[in-house]
Amino acid sequence: MARAAEIPKLGSFEVMNRTIDIAQAALARHTLAVYPPDLLIEVPRSVCRSLDFHRALEVIDVGRALANRALDAFEVGGEAGGEAGATLDGAPDRPAPPTIEG
Protein backbone atom coordinates (compact mmCIF):
# COMPACT_ATOMS: atom_id res chain seq x y z
CA MET A 1 0.00 0.00 0.00
CA ALA A 2 1.44 3.38 -1.06
CA ARG A 3 1.47 6.41 1.19
CA ALA A 4 -0.76 9.34 0.26
CA ALA A 5 2.17 11.76 0.24
CA GLU A 6 5.71 10.49 -0.15
CA ILE A 7 8.33 12.45 1.76
CA PRO A 8 11.35 13.11 -0.47
CA LYS A 9 14.69 11.92 0.85
CA LEU A 10 17.19 14.75 0.96
CA GLY A 11 20.92 14.27 0.92
CA SER A 12 23.24 16.41 3.01
CA PHE A 13 24.10 18.59 -0.01
CA GLU A 14 20.41 19.27 -0.75
CA VAL A 15 19.76 20.16 2.91
CA MET A 16 22.74 22.53 2.91
CA ASN A 17 21.65 24.10 -0.39
CA ARG A 18 18.09 24.68 0.84
CA THR A 19 19.38 26.10 4.13
CA ILE A 20 21.55 28.61 2.26
CA ASP A 21 18.57 29.57 0.05
CA ILE A 22 16.40 30.22 3.12
CA ALA A 23 19.10 32.31 4.82
CA GLN A 24 19.76 34.27 1.63
CA ALA A 25 16.03 35.00 1.16
CA ALA A 26 15.72 36.23 4.76
CA LEU A 27 18.76 38.48 4.37
CA ALA A 28 17.37 39.90 1.12
CA ARG A 29 13.98 40.64 2.75
CA HIS A 30 15.61 42.47 5.65
CA THR A 31 17.94 44.44 3.38
CA LEU A 32 15.05 45.48 1.12
CA ALA A 33 13.03 46.56 4.17
CA VAL A 34 15.85 48.84 5.33
CA TYR A 35 16.86 50.08 1.87
CA PRO A 36 13.77 49.91 -0.35
CA PRO A 37 14.54 50.21 -4.06
CA ASP A 38 12.60 52.40 -6.46
CA LEU A 39 11.87 49.31 -8.56
CA LEU A 40 12.11 45.67 -7.50
CA ILE A 41 12.37 42.94 -10.12
CA GLU A 42 12.13 39.44 -8.67
CA VAL A 43 13.17 36.47 -10.76
CA PRO A 44 11.13 33.48 -9.55
CA ARG A 45 13.11 30.82 -7.70
CA SER A 46 11.73 28.21 -10.08
CA VAL A 47 13.84 29.65 -12.94
CA CYS A 48 17.07 28.12 -11.63
CA ARG A 49 18.85 26.77 -8.60
CA SER A 50 21.96 28.15 -6.97
CA LEU A 51 24.42 25.96 -8.90
CA ASP A 52 22.76 26.07 -12.35
CA PHE A 53 25.62 28.03 -13.91
CA HIS A 54 25.17 26.12 -17.17
CA ARG A 55 21.74 27.79 -17.54
CA ALA A 56 23.12 31.33 -17.28
CA LEU A 57 21.99 32.47 -20.74
CA GLU A 58 18.44 31.23 -20.11
CA VAL A 59 18.28 32.98 -16.74
CA ILE A 60 19.68 36.20 -18.22
CA ASP A 61 16.97 36.10 -20.90
CA VAL A 62 14.27 35.68 -18.22
CA GLY A 63 15.74 38.57 -16.22
CA ARG A 64 15.96 40.76 -19.31
CA ALA A 65 12.28 40.11 -20.18
CA LEU A 66 11.20 40.84 -16.59
CA ALA A 67 13.30 44.01 -16.53
CA ASN A 68 11.78 45.25 -19.79
CA ARG A 69 8.25 44.71 -18.46
CA ALA A 70 9.10 46.30 -15.11
CA LEU A 71 10.76 49.34 -16.66
CA ASP A 72 7.84 49.87 -19.06
CA ALA A 73 5.37 49.71 -16.15
CA PHE A 74 7.60 51.95 -14.02
CA GLU A 75 7.91 54.60 -16.74
CA VAL A 76 4.13 54.67 -17.22
CA GLY A 77 3.27 54.73 -13.51
CA GLY A 78 6.29 56.39 -11.92
CA GLU A 79 6.72 55.23 -8.35
CA ALA A 80 3.13 53.99 -8.14
CA GLY A 81 2.49 50.51 -6.89
CA GLY A 82 2.52 49.23 -3.35
CA GLU A 83 1.44 50.31 0.05
CA ALA A 84 3.24 52.97 2.04
CA GLY A 85 6.20 51.58 3.91
CA ALA A 86 7.89 52.68 7.11
CA THR A 87 11.45 52.90 8.34
CA LEU A 88 12.61 50.79 11.25
CA ASP A 89 11.83 53.62 13.69
CA GLY A 90 8.21 53.74 12.43
CA ALA A 91 8.50 57.01 10.51
CA PRO A 92 6.57 57.04 7.23
CA ASP A 93 8.66 56.28 4.18
CA ARG A 94 8.14 56.36 0.43
CA PRO A 95 5.77 53.81 -1.14
CA ALA A 96 6.95 50.23 -1.47
CA PRO A 97 8.43 49.47 -4.89
CA PRO A 98 6.34 47.66 -7.48
CA THR A 99 7.15 43.97 -7.68
CA ILE A 100 7.25 42.35 -11.09
CA GLU A 101 7.31 38.55 -11.16
CA GLY A 102 7.29 36.20 -14.13
Image (cartoon, rainbow, N blue to C red):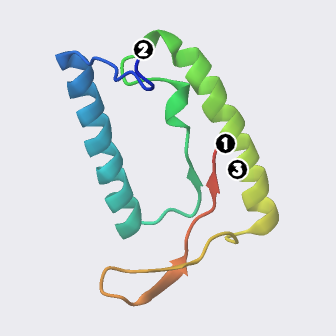
Circle 3 sits in a helix, a strand or a loop, which is it?
helix
Q: Position of residue 5 (x, y in %)?
A: 43, 26
Residue at 56% across / 38% down in the picture?
43
Frontmost residue, 12 versus 70: 12
Earlier-in-chain disc, 1 versus 2? 2
Which residue position holds label 1?
67
Q: Farthest residue toward the top?
A: 54
Question: Which-is-in-front pick, marks 1 and 2?
Answer: 2
Which residue position holds label 3?
70
Eyeballing the image, is 16 above or below 95? above
Eyeballing the image, is 99 above or below 36? above
Give the quarter of the image for residue 34: bottom left
Q: CA distance from mark 1 to mark 2?
A: 45 Å
Q: Which of the image's four quarters has the C terminus?
A: top right
Q: CA distance from mark 3 to mark 2?
A: 46 Å
Which residue position holds label 2?
2
Give the quarter of the image for residue 16: top left
Mark 3 neighbour density, 10 Å: few (under 14) some (14–19) many (20 or more): many
Mark 1 neighbour density, 10 Å: few (under 14) some (14–19) many (20 or more): some
Q: State left or right for residue 45 relative to residue 11.
A: right
Give the quarter of the image for residue 77: bottom right
Q: Are marks 1 and 3 in contact (CB under 8 Å)?
A: yes
Q: Position of residue 18 (x, y in %)?
A: 29, 31
Residue at 30% across / 86% down in the picture?
89
Q: Amino acid at mark 2?
A: Ala
